[in-house]
Amino acid sequence: MSLTLSGRVLPVGGIKEKILAARRAGVKIVILPKKNEKNLEDIPDYIKKEINFILVDHIQEVLDLTLPS
């Protein structure tokens, strides 16, 4: 995940490969930049059913999802 100094989450490359690797590792939740949403079209439906994808625009969203309050 790439970030700007202001905390915006930027799109990254290789989403399909990263998701396939996450599936092989048993990952059930993947947080992605919202601008990479179009890359999910390349992912087979059976994989999309196994993994929960959360799309974010800002680092604060990532922190809220991953760190306890």
Image (spheres, grey):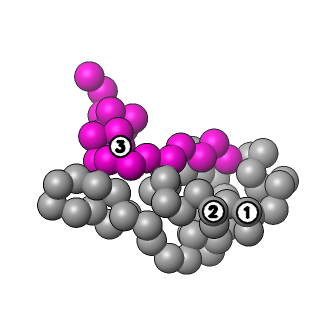
Q: Is residue 45 magenta?
A: no
Region of the chain picked out in magenta, as a range: 51-69
Residue plotted at (39% across, 35% down): 65
Q: Are there few (<14), some (14-19), or many (20+) residues within 10 Å of tag 2?
A: few
- Residue sitting at the far left: 5
Asked if residue 22 shows in the view, the reply is no
Does 60 sit left or right of 56 as displayed? left
- Tell me the residue that label 2 is attached to: 38
Of the residues shown, which amino acid type is indicated by label 2? Lys
Pinpoint residue 50: horizontal percent, then vertical percent. Answer: 74, 46
Tag nearer the camera, 2 or 3? 2
Q: Is residue 32 above or below residue 20?
A: above
- Residue sitting at the far right: 46
Which image quarter is the N terminus in? bottom left
- Tell me the residue that label 1 is attached to: 41
Callout 2: SS: helix
Label 3 or label 1, whichever comes before in sequence order = 1
Mark 3–mark 1 Cα distance, whole angstroms, equals 22 Å
